[in-house]
Amino acid sequence: MQQSNFLLVHSFPSVEKVFESIHVDPEIGFHVSLVAIILLLFAFFAGHSFRKNKNIEPTGKLSFSFLTELSISGLESFNAGIINHPIAKRLFCFYAPLAGFILLSNLLGLIPGFEPPTQEFNMNFTLAICVFILTHIIGIRAHGFSYIKQFLGPVWWLAWLMFPIELVSHLVRPISLALRLLGNMRGDHMVASVFFGMFPLLLPLPFIGLGLFVAMLQTFVFLLLSLVYIQMALDGH
């Protein structure tokens, strides 16, 4: 798998040089770019019927548009069940692409010759930092200067103790999000790679099913924790 992946990436020398010029590993850059292109194509074709007819009504038939609408409705319902605030709908443009990127990155590791970008700590940490920054921006906009009360505890005379504890707990969040996703995806990809190398035909099929489950589960966990952090910021102290 590593050899085929190497040949695939290095078959595009111009693209490889672009990634090297910005100090990015060509293999990681190639896989991230591939996931981004798939997401853009999905968004273009999924929204075609809605752009063509804004008053389109669901037919109930199994089609690409129906599956897209079903997925979007499910994400919106999931978000509304966690974030009890008018800002929930405005956050869709953030968490929907985030969930799609993580899911596709995870699933990419199930294809022989490819590696999931989410098995790299730097990638996961970047996604987690985006969640971290957005969480505190929303908290500050919702509460203003009083948002700092979240770090001071329930009573003023314990503020000197609670502030460092809360500060560390908030700073650890992006690291824990990144490591959780990293550990699960790297472990799953290593297991699948070993069995594909030993038995390339039928035996790896159960591990593909397991990998599919892990990919979806880790996307769900990352999204769930991200939305919970945002709701905690909106709740106040």
Image: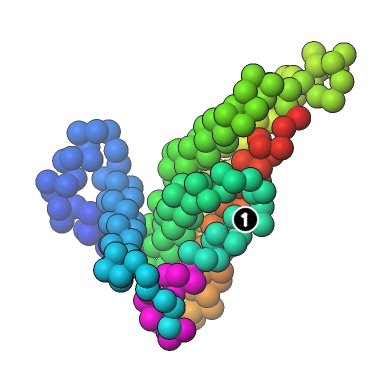
Q: Is residue 224 left or right of residue 22?
A: right
Magenta region: 60-71
Per the picture, the main secondary structure of the magenta-coloured stretch is helix
For the residue carrying disc 1, how many other residues have a C-alpha within 10 Å: few (<14), some (14-19), or many (20+)?
some
Please say if 176 is above or below 210: above
- Say which element carries label 1: helix
**Percent coordinates x, y for residue 132 in the rendering:** 55, 35
Q: Is residue 174 left or right of residue 81?
A: left
**Percent coordinates x, y for residue 198 in the rendering:** 44, 73
Residue at the spot 57% in from the left edge and 52% down from the top edge: 223
Whether residue 193 is visible: no
The amino acid type, in three-letter code, at marker 1 is: Ala
**Percent coordinates x, y for residue 84 in the rendering:** 67, 48
**Percent coordinates x, y for residue 75 in the rendering:** 54, 61
Residue at the spot 67% in from the left edge and 25% down from the top edge: 147
Please say if 18 is above or below 217: above
- The quadrant in which the N terminus is found is bottom left
The residue indicated by pointer 1 is 80
